[in-house]
Image: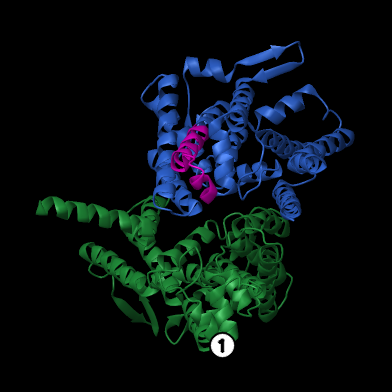
Chain colours: A green, B blue
Amino acid sequence: MSEVKPRDPESERAVRSGTSAAERARELRPARRASPTSSIAWLIAGLAALILLNLASNPAFLSVTVQDGHLYGVPIDILNQGSRTMLLALGMTLVIATGGVDLSVGSVVAIAGAVCALLLNDGAGLATTLAAAIAVGALAGSVNGVLVARFNIQPIVATLILMVAGRGIAQLICGGQVIIISHAGFEYLATGYVLGLPVAPLLVAGLFVAAHLFLRRTSTGLFIEAVGDNETASRFAGLAAARVKALAYVFAGACAGLTGVLTAANIRAADANRAGENAELDAIFAVVVGGTALTGGRFSILGSFLGALLIQTLATTMYFRGVPPSVAPVPKALLIVLVSLLQSEKARAWVMRLWRRNRERVAA
Amino acid sequence: MIARQTEIMKRHLPLVATGAIFLALFITASALYDGFFSARVIVTLFSDNAFLGIAAVGMTLVIFSGGIDLSVGAVIGFTSIFTATLMTGSGLHPLAAWSLAIVLGAALGGTMGWLIHGFGLPAFLITLAGMFLARGAGFWLNTESVGIAHPWYDAIANFELSIGDLIHIPAAALVLVAVMALGYVIAHFTRFGRNLLAIGGSEHSAVLMGLPVGAAKVAVYTLNGACAALAGIVATLYTGSGNPSMGIGLELDAIAVVVIGGTLLAGGRGHVAGTLLGLLIFGTIQSAILFDGRLSSWWMRIVVGALLLVFILLQRFLVRGAAK
């Protein structure tokens, strides 16, 4: 018994076989969990059901018309209004994939909007403003990242600090008032069109494609999944797990910063109280619905995109059905519970047991 | 022996730190502002934040078990509009309306606890759904504030326990003190309280020890739902009306009060007395900002955030020290 026993046989084997970090990370991928592909099938079914429901009462729901070379129609509206949740969900996907969560993104949206108002009304250029807002978001994300990765504080707790303080900071920047922004270039971000399509969803779609390519064509995506699935094992496999986690929060912060820009451009004002209100919840919801488990590990960028699309379609549906906006959270709540149950192994086992018992009774 | 003493010291250090911070804050504010050190201000610390304190006691127990409940603010809003609608609209007796509200709050809490424990779902996601549900239901009842007029209700809202000529303690503060005392006994002198701390320390170990983990978890969410409903009732005493938008963001304040009180957010360690101190710190900052007049209300959020940061880092340091 003189030999030292490896603490983690799997990572030990990977280290001994001398494979590359990416291959080792792939070995650590979970095999037991339901694949995000089935979640995407569920999502598409859900979207189709919602669209059918709308088509029944409004046959023109899916129609898109061209006016002055711009596309108009409900689907375009859904993409336009949903673009901000999609962007937040993109950052949130990576954070949740590392096994964390970022509750502060809504407050960061408010801070970034306040920064935009401050700079633009001071006569700063559009590029400077955009860079500053994204940088402020990344800075906020790095605070979260340091607390989570360096001090090992639970993500819910660590990001709660900035969630509470962030709105205060945004109000401090705004002086407690809603600041109107009038800047043609800035408004273009929310109202402009490129190739007949609105700017914001195009920008967000571009970022999704870029993120997908970056994460899946390089080993970055695997590193994130490895850290989320088993942090200890990934560290033994030679990954800088703390750095991967911290960078995920920085990325989520930067996404929240850009979302703050889009939100401020959309309402042409910085509203420290209402900008990004409950946005973190929608983003988390989109990610979870999209098939990325809250326990970390595998993630699906496409799933998060469709999840955000589903939330916005649900919101639009309720708007068309005449549901007051204040009651709209109720169907959302029921959907959250339903989706969590669908993803829960315990719930699936329970249903299977009921089904089997029923079958035995029929056979007997 | 010495190790045991230092362990006890470590366990109580967050509580002592909270107490010291409260005293320092209160003495500083008394020195800075005329009339701050008065019986009236001290009573206000209890009465103005009574509903927050009541919600925080329930939250303390949930956090003991390693869980979290984001629905309390929405339950407060729902309860306030629900009881106001029943009393003003249907002319129901306040006691009947209050009992119904508490039963509903407990039912929501119990359902969430059942989903969390029974299906292994994440607490923050399920209670988030509970928050959406309660808030939506509140706005569905009425989107605007409803005034409450009932002789019985008014008598309670206007009741004051007077000690001498200087001290007048309103009903809300009395309810807070009673709930705090009850929470203290439940948390630290019953098997249920110890089970909660054991579950928060390590749920797996608690299961292996044969503790009734499922029952305790469902019970603590049920109790917290009832606490939140009671907080909603107390909130209507304070404003004299029911409002569906009452208590927006209150869950964050309640969590902050619990953490500032030295309770470990990861669960397994904490003290209800700390929650009272956390509430007093929260109230002192609020009163000081009001007394100052130059400081804007948003400093409240920034200061609470900073205190959260300090306490979470302190806890981290202590836990790491204990693990070594």
| Above or below, comparing residue A149 to residue B129 in the picture | below
Horizontal relation, residue A121 to residue B75: left or right: right
Tell me the kind of residue under disc 1. Answer: Ser
The residue at which mark 1 appears reads as: A17
Image quadrant where residue B48 sits: top right
Horizontal relation, residue B266 to residue A38: left or right: right
Seen from the viewer's position, the closer of residues B149 and A268 is: B149
Residue at the (44%, 64%) spot, across then down: A288
Q: Which residue lies furthest to the front in this view?
A: A1
Q: Can residue B249 be seen in this view?
A: no
- On the image, the x and y values in percent for residue A192 come to 50, 79
- Look at the image and give the residue range highlighted in magenta: B203-229
- On the image, the x and y values in percent for residue B206 come to 52, 45
- On the image, the x and y values in percent for residue A55 come to 23, 67
- On the image, the x and y values in percent for residue A331 come to 36, 53
| Above or below, comparing residue A106 to residue A132 in the picture | above
The chain that hosts pointer 1 is A
